[in-house]
Image (cartoon, rainbow, N blue to C red):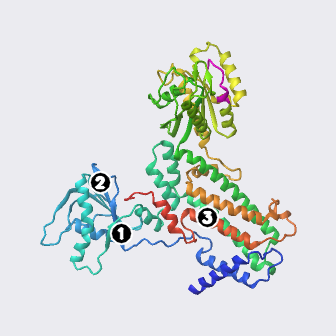
Amino acid sequence: MRAFTSFFSRSHRLITRTLLCPYVCISRSSSSTLRQYVVLHRARNSLSLAQYRPYYSSITTQDEQTIYALSTAPGKAAIAVIRISGPACRQIYERLCPSTAFPKPRFATLRKLYSPNLPPTPLTLLDSGALVLHFPAPNTVTGEDILELHVHGGPAIVRAVLAAIPECVKALKGASLAAPPRIRYAEPGEFTRRAFANNRMDLPQIESLGETLSASTEQQRKLSVRGTTSSLAARYESWRVLLLQARGELEALIDFSEDQHFDESPAVLCASVANQVRVLRVQIEAHIANSVRGELLRNGISVALLGAPNAGKSSLLNRIVGREAAIVSHEAGTTRDVVEIGLDLGGWLVKIGDMAGLRRAGLVGADVVGAVEQEGIKRAKQRALESDVLIVVQDATTEIDPEVLEITKQCVEFGIHVLVAINKTDQLPANDSVRDAWKANVQSVLGVPTDRIAFISCKEATTPSAGNLQSFFNTLLDTFKDMTAALVPDSDPDPSIWQESLGATERQRVLLSECLSHLETFLTTLSPYNSFHDPETVGDAEEVDIVVAAEALRSAADALARITGRGESGDVEEVLGVVFEKFCVGK
């Protein structure tokens, strides 16, 4: 096998230098080296991929070692959970709970915990009432034997029990055990790493687990729960298998196209494969777009309040956050810098910024726009252009400021969601004609739809329903829903599964983009067939480089395999390191 691998490596280096030699559908290349490479490459795939079944890399888990850690947060608490995973669970129990029966699987048993001293040293009571649970392998979270100690949560008790666990090794050595087990404190994320190594969890599930632990809003919770199932990994795997099958069809042409053993002509086969890849490309593009929308749920939606001085931006901010977060004054230009507030708004994580009012430099009445305010206006414009949602606060008693109009139009052009809150409506006449005129004016000048225009009065907002603020908040939440709704490609008959694509992480999105790039290379290579949608209409095949096309499919499939951490590229440990570096000890 080692000689085979060495020969394959030499052939791979040689073929890399000779890829300019075209392999065509009809006229085969006469290069014997090229043929050897393809045969070896296909042989390697048949060994490692096991006829396109999911490939599971071997990961060093140090099975002979038993790990332990505090699984609950440190500090005073009613209960603390200490988790032990590995082959030495029974031996540790026998030292901590001497002369007692081993607990039944998955039954909580009350036990006294003692220090594992050897005679003649007397036993020291560590905890007078601990719940002990045993979870036998392989149906556990790590796939190994697990022992959980639910002890009293006092820091001293927790420290004593944690210190006693490694002492069990010394006690076992003293008992003349031929090969005492190795027991050590767990590394960050090691329990989850072992779950992955033992096929109890896939990598997308693990990433979602990390998000579950850090979720602070309802929408973040829903996002993380979507990924805790195996659906995402199953979809990535189905795409990978499709690419491997397509690649197998192309490589079969290399070896057998002259033998005339195909039901289809080579040209029709290439066109059919190209059509399959085009459909897959659309699905991956939608998946990437949905993952970007999911980032809004994960990292928060950026909202900016824009308007002229004294339009009521700070007052609206205070009503939204429910406290006096910004200074409110009749003096124009009170807010100079961007005031950022993070909050849970209806289940969405929102980062809302109150900014300086926009007005032109120079004389404004008796006031002069100074250097500090000019810098604040500059920052306000930049913050507006970087936001996800722009709320334009307009004084109902004045005209729209040209500065506000200019920045708002730019935001509309950039695809930023714009809402207009016409404030101080308590000063308007009590008839609908004025409001209708305002709506028509805003829609024509700013291009904002009427359902995104609200009339409010922050002065009247003594209760949530006063000043029409609750209706405005509902409009804002509806905007959030539209921004974070999953996109569904027309080619997919099941739109429900695309909700889960919102949970794709940034790492997954980067690898999906890499996969998409390789698919573009493939379609470019098979460009003679890109204009055909019905394979039966394809005429004679034009010369294309099948080797390059097959290699592009291999690279695309490998990018998908790295998403789940089950790839064959040799960088599995590097992938896992990126994922697990954010996990705490005990998880």
Q: Which residues are magenta?
A: 396-405
Separation of disc 2 and disc 1 at Cα? 20 Å
Q: Nearer the viewer, residue 513 or 260?
A: 513
Q: Residue at x 73, y 71 (%)?
A: 548
Residue 102, percent across and down?
A: 27, 66
* Residue neighbourhood size for the residue with mark 3, other residues' Cα within 10 Å, grouped as few (<14), some (14–19), many (≥20): many
Q: Amino acid at mark 3?
A: Ala
Q: Which mark is residue 71?
A: none
Residue identifier under label 2: 80
Q: Give the answer, above or below, for where 394 lies relative to 195.
A: above
Q: Amino acid at mark 1?
A: Gly
Q: Which image quadrant for residue 160? A: bottom left
Which one is earlier in the sequence, the residue at label 2 or at label 3? 2
Q: Residue at x 68, y 16 (%)?
A: 433
Please give left or right for residue 73 compared with residue 273 in the image: left
Check the image and name the residue furthest to the right.
539
Labels 2, 3: front one: 3
* Residue neighbourhood size for the residue with mark 1, other residues' Cα within 10 Å, grouped as few (<14), some (14–19), many (≥20): many
Q: Nearer the viewer, residue 153 or 256?
A: 153
Helix, strand or loop at label 3? It is helix
Residue 193, percent across and down?
A: 44, 64
Q: Amino acid at mark 2?
A: Ala
